[in-house]
Amino acid sequence: MERAILAIKNEYDNKLNKNVIKYFQREKVVYFSFDSVTNYTSNLYQVKFLNSLTLNGLLTHRHIIKEKCPIMLLRNLHPSNDLYNGIRMICKLFKNNIIIAQISIRQFYKKIIMIPRISLCTSNDEALPFKFKRN
């Protein structure tokens, strides 16, 4: 896997993902996020509204993926264990909270890794009146 498609906006990225995923003949797996508000205003916002948010640096609420589909890590999860930003992988197996993938770059070719479900929060400088958390 020598090439990658990069998009500057989430809306472009989501459209690209939907188009590319169609070409993989495997059964799709759908992951849904668990969205919440982390401060005192948590009861003011409906879950449906939180699920509809698409913010920079966060995946959408509904994420579709297939076996043998290429993915790229966008966070430094464990750099000393080869899980750093930009590493490319091929999906092998899906569990409720873990994606098992095989690294596809030369340096660590065929190394199997597990990517856990992680929580991400918006920073205080976002244009939201609350702090948003997506798992």
Image: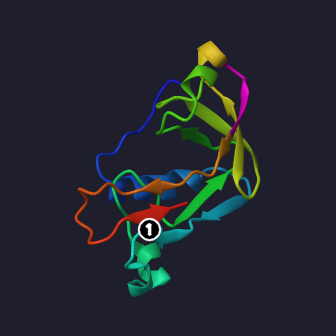
Question: From what the image shows, is residue 18 above or below residue 20?
Answer: below
- The image quadrant where one finds the N terminus is top right
The residue wearing badge 1 is 38
- The image quadrant where one finds the C terminus is bottom right
The amino acid type, in three-letter code, at marker 1 is Thr
Residue density around tag 1, few if under 14, some if 14–19, many if 20 or more, within 10 Å: few
- Splitting the image into 4 quarters, where does residue 105 fall? top right
The stretch of residues the image draws in magenta is 109-114
- Splitting the image into 4 quarters, where does residue 6 fall? top left
Say which element carries label 1. Answer: loop
Q: Is residue 117 visible?
A: yes
**Residue 51 position in % (x across, y down):** 47, 74
Of residue 115 and residue 6, the one placed in the foreground of this image is 115
78 relative position to 95: left or right:
left
Q: Residue at x 63, y 44 (%)?
A: 69
Of residue 11 and residue 131, the one placed in the foreground of this image is 131
Q: Residue at x 41, y 58 (%)?
A: 15
How many numbered markers are drawn?
1
Q: Is residue 49 magenta?
A: no
**Residue 30 position in % (x across, y down):** 65, 64
Question: From what the image shows, is residue 13 above or below residue 1?
Answer: below
Q: Residue at x 30, y 52 (%)?
A: 9
Q: Residue at x 39, y 76 (%)?
A: 40
Q: Is residue 67 visible?
A: no
Of residue 43 and residue 15, the one placed in the foreground of this image is 43
**Residue 61 position in % (x across, y down):** 51, 67
